[in-house]
Image (spheres, rainbow, N blue to C red):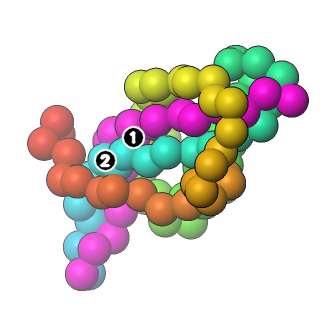
């Protein structure tokens, strides 16, 4: 299996913060073992969907979006946590 680092951006995520629904986005890295770039992307996006399940309040007519910004094959994961967790959230101005 090959090792990959994926840098992912999420946009248009409606979440509850301090009692009100706000539109947010995020950046995150995921470290994945997979057979190829495409499989790594699929695995990473599935992991993120599972992590965010129950947090996202979007209506079906306005779904959140995720984009693979970087997909880099690595020789080693070094000191990075695999597959990684956490998000750097930002207010999404594209309302």
Callout count? 2
- Are dots 2 and 1 in contact, CB under 8 Å? yes
What segment carries the magenta color? 1-18
Q: Residues within 10 Å of mark 1 (few under 14, many from 20)?
A: many
In the picture of the structure, the residue carrying the numbered disc 1 is 10
Q: Residue at x 37, y 45 (%)?
A: 27
Which of the two residues, 40 or 3, is positioned nearer the viewer here?
A: 3
Residue 83: percent from the left, percent from the top? 67, 52
Instruction: Give above or below for 58 relative to 46.
Output: below
Would you name the residue on which mark 2 appears?
A: 25
Q: Which of the pair 63/46 is nearer the observer?
A: 46
Question: Dot 1 lies on which element?
Answer: strand
Q: Is residue 2 above or below residue 7?
A: above
* Residue 85, horizontal then vertical, whole percent: 56, 60
Residue 82 falls in image quadrant: bottom right
Q: Residue 53: x percent and y percent?
A: 60, 60
Name the dominant secondary structure of the magenta segment.
Answer: strand
Q: Residue at x 16, y 36 (%)?
A: 94
Of callouts 2 and 1, which one flags the residue occurring earlier in the amino acid sequence? Answer: 1
Residue 43 visible, this orientation: no
Kindly identify the residue that appears in the image at 18 percent across and 53 percent down: 91
Residue found at the very far bottom of the displayed protein:
18
Give the residue drawn at x 77%, y 37%. 33
- Work out whether 80 lies above or below 55: above
Is 9 covered by the magenta stretch?
yes
Disc 2 to disc 1, how far (Cα)? 5 Å
Q: Quadrant of the N terminus?
A: top right
The local crowd at label 2, few if under 14, some if 14 to 19, many if 20 or more residues have their Cα within 10 Å, is many
Q: Secondary structure at mark 2?
A: strand
Residue 9 lies, in percent from the top left, at 39, 37
**For residue 80, which numbered disc appears in the image?**
none
């Amino acid at each position: 299996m090959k090792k990959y680092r994926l840098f992912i951006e999420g946009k248009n995520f409606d979440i509850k913060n301090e009692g009100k629904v706000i539109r947010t986005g995020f950046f995150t890295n995921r470290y994945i073992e997979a057979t190829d770039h495409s499989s790594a992307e699929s695995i990473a996006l599935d992991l993120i969907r599972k992590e965010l399940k129950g947090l996202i309040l979007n209506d079906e007519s306005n779904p959140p979006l995720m984009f693979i910004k970087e997909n880099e094959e690595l020789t080693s994961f070094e000191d990075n946590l695999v597959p990684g967790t956490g998000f750097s959230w930002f207010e999404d101005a594209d309302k």
